[in-house]
């Protein structure tokens, strides 16, 4: 729980928000933010002040489509070694999961970094690293791609770009958003300036924030103040780590290695320029190119299984408990979708801290 001094500060912030007498809906796009909101009871505290916070598409495992996971399964079943982060293993698709493929004899290995995958490539014939994550993790992939890589090593990029997804949510107009809580770890790389045009275009207040309870409470109060004062600015609550220009070296490296491409997200149609794929100079290590013929023969798969409503949660339309399968047919041991698999997924977080129902 909060430290005593933090608890006093939290109470003061809550009281300040209550005094504003608001009825507002904000959205964040970070699994760690959701974990903090639920674990410390901040979600309910803020609802009592008139502020609702919805989780958007901020879980990298969750936004990766079933088609992309099916590609990895297809490669694994064809004799290619697949290296993935642990959260990807149990995500179900209509053709099974990567864990199922491994249990059936495919060589699927859990790694903790792309460097692990490069090192393990010396032990196998063909190695593909399934790269996921937003602007936070894409620099780590880019940093390895500019090195002298083994010939048998390639990357299947599932990296996503944050702002196009937020733009898609707003343009879809499924519900109104009064303000956005932006993820501090993304902004460490990109800086805050990339959000400026977004605020101008959509007149939506934004606050970049960290991951502690007080960070989220302060970000909420800052958004409330912006709205009360008729502003739509980009404010930086996370100044201890985030600079306006971001990490210029890392951001430039990402742009050197990757190019933005159109790609579908789980729960979304095709979003223009919303993902990173390797530039042509890296085709020799681009799994999408190397195995293009094999992957093109695979039949498309459905995104969701059964009654899973993960896609709607990623768009902020429903809460986990509003899904009829939550805690019943769908639980961490037998997940129906990635929102219950990943520890950054809204369903997994709700199950851990709220219990089954």
Image (tube, grey):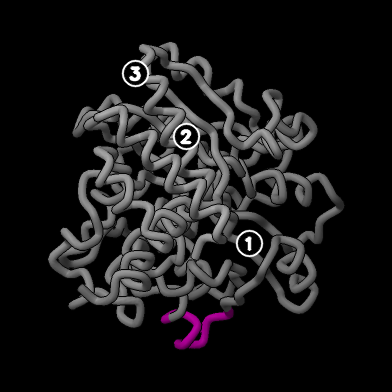
Tell me the number on the disc at residue 6: none
Quick one: SS at disc 1? strand
Furthest residue in direction left, as rendered: 324
Q: Which residue is mark 1?
A: 129
344 relative position to 332: left or right: right
Q: Earlier in the sequence, mark 3 or mark 2?
A: 3
The residue segment tinted magenta is: 100-107
Find residue 91 and report its horizontal and vertical position in percent: 39, 69
Q: Are marks 3 and 2 in contact (CB under 8 Å)?
A: no
Check disc 1: other Cα within 10 Å, few if <14, some if 14-19, many if 20+: many
The residue at the point 35 percent across, 20 percent down is 227
* Inter-mark Cα distance, 1 to 2: 20 Å
Mark 2, secondary structure of its residue: strand
Residue at horizontal 36 percent and vertical 70 percent from the top? 353
In the rendered structure, find residue 274 and report the number of the disc placed on it: 2
Residue 202, given in percent of the width and then of the height, sits at 36, 16
Give the image quarter of residue 171: top left
Q: Residue at x 29, y 30 (%)?
A: 177
Q: Position of residue 276 (x, y in %)?
A: 57, 39
Which residue has dot 3 on it?
228
Residue 351, above or below 131: below
Total marks shown come to: 3
Quick check: marks 1 and 2 in contact, CB under 8 Å?
no
């Amino acid at each position: 729980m909060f430290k005593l001094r933090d608890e006093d500060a939290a109470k003061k912030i809550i009281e300040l928000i209550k005094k504003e007498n608001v009825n507002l809906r904000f959205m964040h796009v970070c699994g760690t933010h959701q974990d903090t909101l639920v674990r410390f009871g901040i979600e309910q505290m803020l609802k009592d002040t008139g502020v609702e916070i919805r989780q958007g598409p901020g879980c990298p495992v969750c936004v990766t489509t079933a088609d992309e996971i099916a590609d990895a399964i297809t490669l694994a079943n064809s004799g290619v070694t697949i290296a993935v982060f642990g959260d990807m293993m149990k995500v179900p698709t209509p053709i099974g999961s990567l864990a199922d493929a491994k249990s059936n004899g495919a060589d699927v290995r859990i790694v903790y970094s792309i460097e692990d995958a490069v090192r393990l490539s010396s032990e196998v014939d063909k190695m593909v690293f399934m790269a996921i994550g937003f602007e936070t993790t894409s620099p780590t992939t880019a940093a390895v791609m500019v090195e002298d890589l083994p010939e048998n090593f390639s990357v299947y990029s599932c990296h996503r770009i944050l702002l196009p997804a937020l733009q898609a949510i707003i343009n879809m107009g499924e519900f109104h958003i009064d303000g956005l809580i932006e993820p501090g770890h993304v902004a460490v790389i990109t800086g805050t300036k990339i959000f400026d045009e977004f605020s101008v275009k959509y007149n939506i207040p934004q606050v970049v924030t960290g991951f502690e309870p007080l960070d989220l409470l302060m970000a909420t109060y800052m958004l409330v103040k912006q709205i009360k004062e008729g502003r739509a600015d980009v404010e930086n609550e996370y100044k201890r780590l985030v600079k306006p220009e971001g990490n210029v070296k890392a951001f430039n490296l990402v742009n050197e290695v990757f190019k933005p491409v159109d790609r579908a997200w789980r729960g979304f149609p095709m979003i223009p320029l919303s993902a990173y794929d390797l530039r042509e100079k890296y085709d020799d290590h681009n799994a999408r190119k190397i195995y293009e013929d094999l992957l093109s023969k695979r039949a498309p798969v459905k995104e969701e299984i059964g009654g899973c409503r993960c896609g709607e949660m990623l768009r902020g339309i429903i809460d986990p408990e509003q899904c009829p399968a939550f805690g019943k047919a769908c639980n961490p041991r037998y997940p129906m979708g990635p929102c219950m698999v990943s520890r950054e997924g809204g369903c997994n977080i709700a199950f851990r801290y709220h219990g089954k129902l």
